[in-house]
Image (cartoon, rainbow, N blue to C red):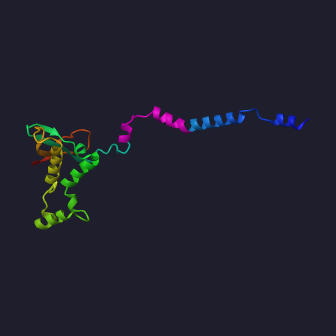
Amino acid sequence: MTASGAENKNAKPAGSDERRWIVTYALLTVFLFGPLLVSFAFTRNLYPFAASTMMMSGGRLKDGTDYYILRGETLTGETISLPPVEMTNALAGRAWGVVSATVENKSFSIRSPHPANLELLSTIGGPANLAPAARLPELLRAWGAIYNARLPETSPGRLKAVRLDAYRWDGGSYANYDRFVQTWRVEL
């Protein structure tokens, strides 16, 4: 036999290596993406709800919470909802976190309070004499000013007052969310 005949006997058919790689990668793809496809098929939440609920704790019914609703009173006497997120372009949790911190006077108990807060504390005689929600009127006026700045001076939709209503949910059940606590109102 010639050398070329021995080569032909041991030679693999053309494309067998290519077919082997295709089969290998096909199996690898099925093993890697198969569980993902199954999980998508049997998911209980669909996008975008799954993304919004995956960080939430479930079943903690014993913890109650306070929540707030911001409203404005227009020059025509109409009461409108004022979402702080739309006025300040902030994240929803951050906007309401500012409200909660302001109501609870947390800006006075940080390590380095603002000089205006230190001045207020010194004039009233210390934190023991601090009124609840001491800086809240300033926050409400600021939000009212932001809202009014977007409207013409002659608009009847301009605000004459801003109101923050506090509600309490005591926990324990998925009900009774509307226990009114208090209202703060400032004229603009």
Q: Is residue 111 left or right of residue 36?
A: left
Nearest to the observer: residue 52 or residue 171: 52
Nearest to the observer: residue 142 or residue 135: 142
Q: Is residue 12 among the parts visible in the rendering?
A: yes
What's the magenta region? 32-53
Task: Name the quadrant of the N terminus.
Answer: top right
Give coordinates of residue 78: x percent, y percent: 10, 37
Nearest to the observer: residue 122 or residue 62: 122
Give coordinates of residue 7: x percent, y percent: 84, 37
The dominant secondary structure in magenta is helix
Q: Is residue 170 left or right of residue 33?
A: left
- Magenta-drawn stretch contains 148: no
Q: Quadrant of residue 152 in the image?
A: top left
Residue at 88%, 38% (x, y): give it. Answer: 3
Give coordinates of residue 107: x percent, y percent: 22, 59
Q: Residue furthest right?
A: 1
- Note whether 26 is above or below 60 in the view shown: above
- Note whether 140 is above or below 75 in the view shown: below
Q: Is residue 62 among the parts visible in the rendering?
A: no
